[in-house]
Amino acid sequence: MTRLNSRSHSSSRAAAFQRVPCHRHSAQPVRHSHCEGIPNIIEKAVLVYVREPQMDALDELLRRPTPSALVALDGAVLSLNAAMARALGRSVEQCLGHGFGDLLPASQLTSVESLVAHAATTDTVAMRVLEFPGPETASVVCLVEARHVNDPDEPLVWLHSLEAGNDRGGLLIPFRLAAKAANLGLCIYSPQERELEWLGGAPSLAALFPKAFRSLSEVVRRVHPDDRRALRRLVPSMVARSPWIRLRFFTECDGWLLLVCQARRVLLGYGGPEQVFGVIRDDTKWEARRRRALVALSAERQRADEIAAFSSALMTAVTEQEIQQVVLTRLAATFGGSGAALALVTEGRLCVCSDAGIPLPVAAVHGLPLDAPSPLPYVIRTGEPQFIRNQEDYIRRWPHGAMVPYFDQLDSGCAISITSLSPGGDQPLGAWLVTYDSEHRSSPAERALMCTLADLAGQALKRVRLQEARIELATALQQTMLPTLPEHLPGLEVAARYRPSRDGLDIGGDWYDAFVTPDGAVALEIGDAQGHDVDAAAAMGQVRASMRAIAAHEPDPTSVLMRTNELLLTMQAARFASCTMLYIDPGNGRVTGASAGHVPLLYARDDGSHSIRELPGGPVLGVLPGADYPEETFTLDKDAALVMVTDGVVEGPALTLDAGLERAGKLAAQAVHDGLNAEETADLILDDAVAENHLDDVAVLIIRRT
């Protein structure tokens, strides 16, 4: 294929193709004057004869409000809409005839070549995250889709930006990978909250951000006084890319570090929000042992964040195209591969799309029947994953079936992992495929993780395709799992409320429970199982039922949480859960409680005061073997109340956890002071959470001593 910067044919072709998008054209000749100085153009004018049906069909592709362009197979821009011109930071005339890759930053040329070449040689959809120069001071990061277009004159490629509002984290992956490859750190600054969020990159720099978020004032305090002026000039910089600055930064464990920093302004998606990225390089020599420990810790944390983001993006996808976007932007990066493809079953045949980084011709398996003698259909039929470490391994295991044509022409070190989206025996949904540029041996942990994520993708696909049926099932399942609270407790009032999320399925993993133990104590628990789908509800019911059964034989919350944690690990539960559990003596108000990574308690008194009580405890349930859950004992005064909530009550898009706890605590204290009973107090707190536009499930459990 001709490289994208070839101009000998594309300039004249662009002149012959030039037209104003979104307007009909007659069959009359149109004369266009060319700008002087453009190479390879001799004539001062060219007659353009447009055939109306062809033009209308092609112009329709450019009528979208998002950036769109038609390019020749060598990458030359033949036509584009105004939105694409603005994203490229040029006028329409300045773009026509030029290679699309030449209009982007130099770092994007290879990605553009791969994207256009893939679409030009196949009939499948390809996607890439590309960085555009932008119309003003900030560059624009977009998810671009490429499709092959059949034109009577010559084949074309249609490039257009996709809406990625539900997965903006996918747009950041190239930045994170580039930062990591260059041994740089990457963070983002929010002017509204005046805080920095760590995005990843060089693991050795993770010690600068022991927490995901850090306020700007805290960062400034740790900078050497002589360097703070330079930092303050860097943060509000209005240029697209600031100069590099050097500053000294203090950490408790390593003392003073010498850092080199730069700020960049980026728009996430066309028309998306403007963000300020900070790029950080550590010029300090680290002591070898400490550096190895920090690198390992950072790598694990970053991988955990990537996996959590991958899972969250799959569970929040609401269309099949969104599932494709999540898989194709995240899969290869998550498992260190060079490319990824997604094959879905449609009427017994494979419908394949890829991220354009895959070295195999995906069109060769597009439309393949499920009974074909090759690994991909085999995995979909049986549900058994295939991890092929190199070409020799493939030939040994599949001597009579070609996985795809031309596989034997690839580098002998090329490796492939294929995982089904549905277990064997279920209705075949499809599979995903990860390729590697060199020999790759998947560890047991990597194989298990890939299967788990593939199962999540399969669940998301089922949810999208069977949305209405799943909603009905979810609603019925949630209702059957809500417990009945005990009545007429001597000296105590108990009330609970639950409301599901307003996004996606009307179901989640929040739960509450209250019951009397064999020794007469009142046990109360509230928790949140991971996820917001039917499986999360099933996991919630499993945890709640297990805790109630265990509590019948254990005298304290510590023992209940420890045994529940070990039970979930033994069962290899796919979900973890946070939980708070209390035992209350109705006679004297003595409370014993412990927490498994859950939201703190609220203590509301009849004098209108309140306090936030964070119980001791351990990690969430179902993650760490042998975890301990220390407990605490205190007294619930008469006419006082304990308020137990899930994070959906006290956290929201515009509400931090601390602010949410303070808000709910004041409401509860005022309600107790005004003489409201437990039911009225629960309604008050739930209504306030809903009014705050919280998107998560919300659960409230209140116990008041009378």
Image (spheres, helix red, strand yellow):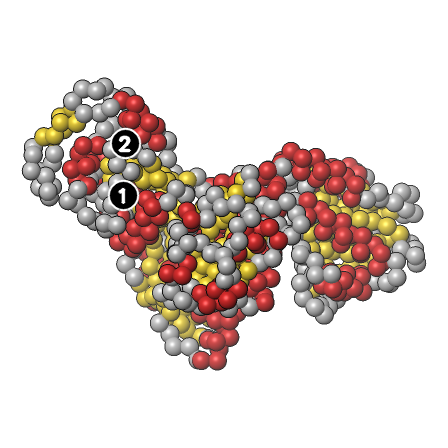
Q: Nearer the viewer, mark 1 or mark 2?
A: 2
Which numbered marker is on residue 705?
none
Residue at (30% x, 23% y) in the render: 53
- SS at circle 2: loop
Residue at (41% x, 47% y) in the render: 363
Q: Nearer the viewer, residue 21 or 527?
A: 21
| Mark 1–mark 2 distance (CA, rounded to whole Å) | 14 Å
Horizontal side of 220 relative to 457 (left or right) equals left
Q: Which residue is mark 2?
A: 152
Cβ–Cβ under 8 Å for marks 1 and 2: no
Q: Which residue is mark 1?
A: 73
Above or below 441: residue 382: above
Mark 1: give few (<14), some (14-19) or many (20+) Cα within 10 Å.
Answer: many
* Residue 392 visible at all: yes
- SS at circle 1: loop
Residue at (85% x, 56% y) in the render: 549
Q: Nearer the viewer, residue 134 or 344?
A: 344
Which of the two labelled residues, at mark 1 and mark 2, occupies the earlier sequence position?
Answer: 1
